[in-house]
Amino acid sequence: MQGEERITSDPEILSGKPIIRGTRLAVEFILEQLAAGATDAELIEDYPHLTREDILACLAYAAWIVKEFRPVPRTA
């Protein structure tokens, strides 16, 4: 997975949700902010320790999850 050096998970931090390494910023939070219309520049301004590469790693992680997810077929 691309960006894996930036995304990590620790059961002691945010109940094990994927986060940006070295922060308490969940990948989920960054994706929600982007989906709501926040720009990279706005996120970096609000969270100065965040980088564009961190944001791209979140997007790469989301793409990987979607690619790997295999839903269970519904039965009628």
Image: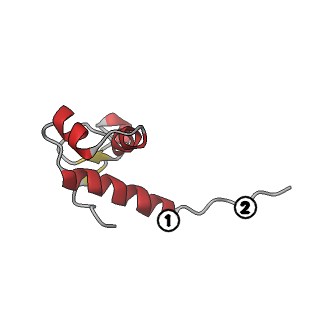
Q: Is residue 21 above or below residue 57?
A: above
Hey, which quadrant is residue 24 in on the image? top left
Q: Amino acid at mark 1?
A: Glu
**Label 2 CA crowd tier, 10 Å (few <14, some 14–19, many 20+):** few
Hey, which quadrant is residue 65 in on the image? bottom left
Q: Are marks 2 and 1 in contact (CB under 8 Å)?
A: no
Label of residue 49 in the image: none
Label of residue 73 in the image: 2
Q: Residue at x 42, y 37 (%)?
A: 36
Tell me if 76 is positioned left or right of 39 in this view: right
Q: Earlier in the sequence, mark 2 or mark 1?
A: 1
Q: Nearer the viewer, residue 48 or 26?
A: 48
Image quarter (top left, top right, bottom left or bottom right) of the C terminus: bottom right
Q: Is residue 36 above or below residue 51?
A: above
Q: Is residue 57 above or below residue 19?
A: below
Q: How many marks?
A: 2
Tell me if 69 is positioned left or right of 32 in this view: right
Q: Helix or strand or loop: what does disc 2 sit on?
A: loop
- Percent x, y of residue 70: 59, 63
Q: Residue at x 34, y 47 (%)?
A: 18
Q: Amino acid at mark 2?
A: Pro
Q: Is residue 62 above or below residue 32?
A: below
Q: Residue reaching furthest top?
A: 46
Image quarter (top left, top right, bottom left or bottom right) of the N terminus: bottom left
Whole-number angstrom distance, CA of label 2 to CA of label 1: 15 Å
Q: Helix or strand or loop: what does disc 1 sit on?
A: helix
Label of residue 68 in the image: 1
